[in-house]
Amino acid sequence: MDNPLGAIALSGPLVGAFLTALVLSILLGAVMRWLSASIGAVVPPRPDRWHSQPTPTMGGVAIAGATIVAFGIGLVRLGVVDFAEPWGPVLLSALAMCCVGIMDDRLQLSALAKLVASLAIGAFLVFLLAGLAPAGSMPLADTLVATVWFAGVCHAVNLLDNMDGLAAGVTLIATIFLAVLLAAPLGPGLALLLVVLAGALAGFLFWNRPPARLFMGDSGSLFIGALLGASSLVPVVRTQIAFVSPAVLVVLILIVPLFDTSFVLVLRRLAGRKASKGGTDHVSHRLVSLGFSERSAVRILYLFGLAGGLAAWVIGTPRGVEPMALVAVFAVLLGLVGIYLARVPAYNAEDFLALQKSSFAPFLKDLTFRWHAAEVLLDLVLITVCYYGAYRLRFDGPELDTFLPFFTTSLPVVLGCRLPALYASGLYQRSWETFGLRDLAAVVRGVGLGSLLVLAVASLMYRFAGFQRGVLVLDPILLTMALMITRGSFRAMGLIASTRSKRNRRVLVYGAGAFGRLLVREMRSNPHWHMNPVGFLDDDPAKAHRWIAGVPVRGAIDDLERLLRRYSVDEVVLSSPAINGSVEARVRSVCVEQERKVRRFSMEIE
């Protein structure tokens, strides 16, 4: 089966158009840096912005200018100047939003004014695109959704522009995937427009990469958002139901700005803050609050955008992958990241203020703050996905079509048995942050009890009619793995944040015995210590080159001086009272020479 969505070919003219836009963007960026500084279009450092010195803005004019000029050249070279194609309305809407952005950069428009403008421009865009629909017009509901979608993407990109190189890099990735995966329904003209936009964004990153020397401003973010929002409407309006709806691909491709906007708006509402009030509470800011550097935070969001685009590529082509199953898995992973980041304080201890003041506060406190409701809903999705995955692994082709109705019929029974079993196992009383091997017993107990209940119901009530034994074997295996991954995700994310944090001191622990193991576990689990154990130092040859409590034994006391330099150690901690006398004196002598701090771990019970 051929790919019904089509794919764009990297022809010479397209590569030339991309490079033309890239060069023009760099050159126009230099012009806008000078012009912005001369007219006072400079953004001073502010608490809600992520820069420390005055920076010229209005780089969006350079992006728009490079896009338009390169697009015109590309149309002539490719010979696709067809004014009946949808690139005309898309480009006009983007230019209109660029003008709104320029006015905002110079006159500081209110959030309401920008919202009204984006909805009005979106309405006219939908009017011009309505003729692309198979019926020649769009239903009322589709018209309203398309208008709101256009405005939403515009403001999502606008909100994403909160850190050097973030919005430009994320939208560059999204633009490339949109052009490649949806080239056929987009048409050659619109595909070319996205290619030159990608080139302009790549050129702008020359000026906007950390530390930024030029900001795109609202003129750039609204122009980019309008082009992406308008372009993403065309495949949805034009394409009839195919292998997978283009709407799903569009959401995956634009997952970073959509997720960031939804995340910020929901949490601001729960914190009792105005949605239009800016602040350092975006996903990027919370990653930095966890200890990641600004560059690392931006790269992580690049990876999220790349993952969304790759997921769209996988489900957008018939590769034997069930689209909705992959979307469900991706949504679960994104939900886990969102829940974890929501726990990072961002509102001066006023997080979830609206919930605390509501009349349902006691109920919400018991469920929301302990995440029990979220856990149950998550497990509902996991049980469904794993049960379906067992059918996909057990059957294929015509067999799958034959047995898939039994999945739908038996799913309520599986849910009705597994959820109470997980509750009875005590799994919902386990902390995600400290989830480990000891908690694995609760997972096995819950899954095993649920499997026994499913078998009992299948045998006594249905005589195994509709229940496949192979599926009943695969399902608990998949569910056990899924529960372990989700429950261990918070601990894994906390470990990654701890080891990557730039604010944490790099610590070498002397002594890999019981006290040393206790110490490194506390370092890893207690973020307030701001300590990152990079290794053990131990004189026992049996422990050499082994990993203890997740930390490697780097060497013995003779290796201390070398290890201090190699691993950029900030301090050495003596973990045991047995480390004293001449050994302690030698450690302190080496650390004094290397200007490293030495401390001793002590524990008292009074």
Image: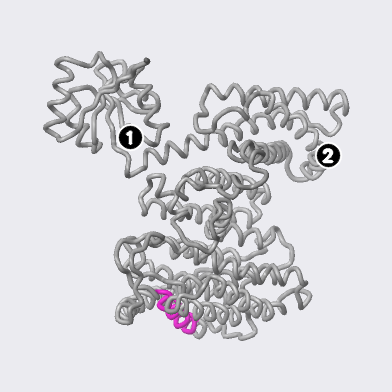
| Local secondary structure at mark 2 | helix
Secondary structure, magenta segment, majority class: helix
In this rendering, the label closer to the viewer, 2 or 1 = 1
Residue assigned mark 1: 531
Which circle's residue, 2 or 1, is located before the other in the chain?
2
Dividing the picture into quadrants, the one containing residue 581 is: top left
Residue name at image x 52 percent, y 37 percent: 489
Q: Residue at x 56, y 54 (%)?
A: 272
Reading the image, the residue beneath label 2 is: 409
Q: Position of residue 233 (x, y in %)?
A: 64, 70
Question: What range is drawn magenta here?
Answer: 59-74
- Answer above or below: position of 186 versus 293: below
The amino acid type of the residue labelled 2 equals Thr
Residue in the image at 80% along x and 41% along y: 408
| Position above or below: 215 against 373 | below
Mark pair 2, 1: CA separation: 53 Å
Q: Is residue 469 left or right of residue 211?
A: right
Quadrant of the image containing the C terminus: top left
Let me know if residue 66 is in the magenta part: yes
Quadrant location, the N terminus: bottom right
379 relative to 48, above or below = above
Q: Quadrant of residue 208?
A: bottom left
